[in-house]
Image: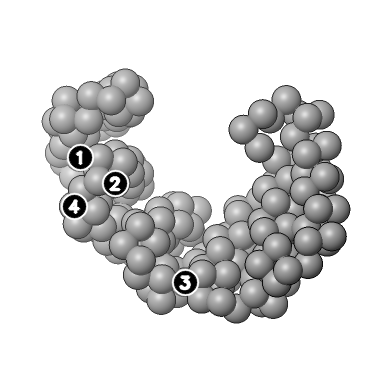
Amino acid sequence: SDDLKKLAECIRGFAAVLVTLGKTDAAMGLFQEHDRICLEIGDMRSLQRSLGNQAVALYRKGKLDEALELFDRQEALCRELSEKTGLVRCLNNKALVLNTRDDLDNAMKLHREVEIICRELGNPAILAVNLGNQAIILWKWGKLGKAMELFKNQEHIARELGDPYGIQRSLGNQALILRDILDYDGAMVLHREQEKICRELGHFDG
């Protein structure tokens, strides 16, 4: 059983490399072999990770229905196993797919569940990203005040964590909301702070 578990992990690792190289079809064959071994030895934790990896690969290829189907299977396993870290990852990824489909209501439901779990687990890094994701949906809905509140909460957490990438991202989004409400002076102040952080980081995309 231990040997089969190690073999399955090797196969999954190799499949992940193939996905990175853009060889998704070849990777899927390996993932399926990995999953077969996991079912044989009853390693459901490794199986749920594999389902998530496959779903992400399909999402990147634009195969949204197939990706959601695998995320649903991963979610069911995570709930069965009380695997909360895996569940957070799964729900975040499902929300991305739903966002891509403009199904913002259901994406927001998932983001709110992730927020609750992150607060339970005491995971501020993922919570900060989550609050930003919720804020973007609120922004799309025209709820600018609530979106700004969440972006500020995200910035506060990023500052507490010493995460300059998170800080600059939040500042940039806050500035765009200020621009939307025609507060150009306020927007410029935040963009200049964002620019300073990006230059210090050598983050030229930002």
Could you tell which of marks 4 and 3 lies nearer the N-terminus?
A: 4
Q: Are marks 2 and 1 in contact (CB under 8 Å)?
A: no
Q: Amino acid at mark 1?
A: Asp
Q: Amino acid at mark 2?
A: Tyr
Distance (Cα) linking label 2 and label 4: 8 Å
Could you tell which of marks 1 and 3 lies nearer the N-terminus?
A: 1
What residue do we see at 60% from left, 54% from top?
Answer: 129
Instruction: Write down the residue under mark 4.
Output: 66
Could you tell which of marks 4 and 1 lies nearer the N-terminus?
A: 1
Q: Is 111 or 31 nearer to us in this picture?
A: 111
Instruction: Write down the residue under mark 2.
Output: 59
Q: Is residue 129 left or right of residue 93?
A: right
Could you tell which of marks 3 and 2 lies nearer the N-terminus?
A: 2
**Badge 3, how many Cα within 10 Å: few under 14, some, many 20+?**
some
Q: Is residue 124 left or right of residue 20?
A: right
Distance (Cα) linking label 2 and label 1: 19 Å
Residue 187 percent across, percent down from the top left: 78, 58
Closest to the camera, between mark 1 and mark 3, is: 3
Q: Amino acid at mark 3?
A: Met
Residue 57 percent across, percent down from the top left: 29, 39
Instruction: Write down the residue under mark 1.
Output: 35
Quadrant of residue 175 within the rendered picture: bottom right
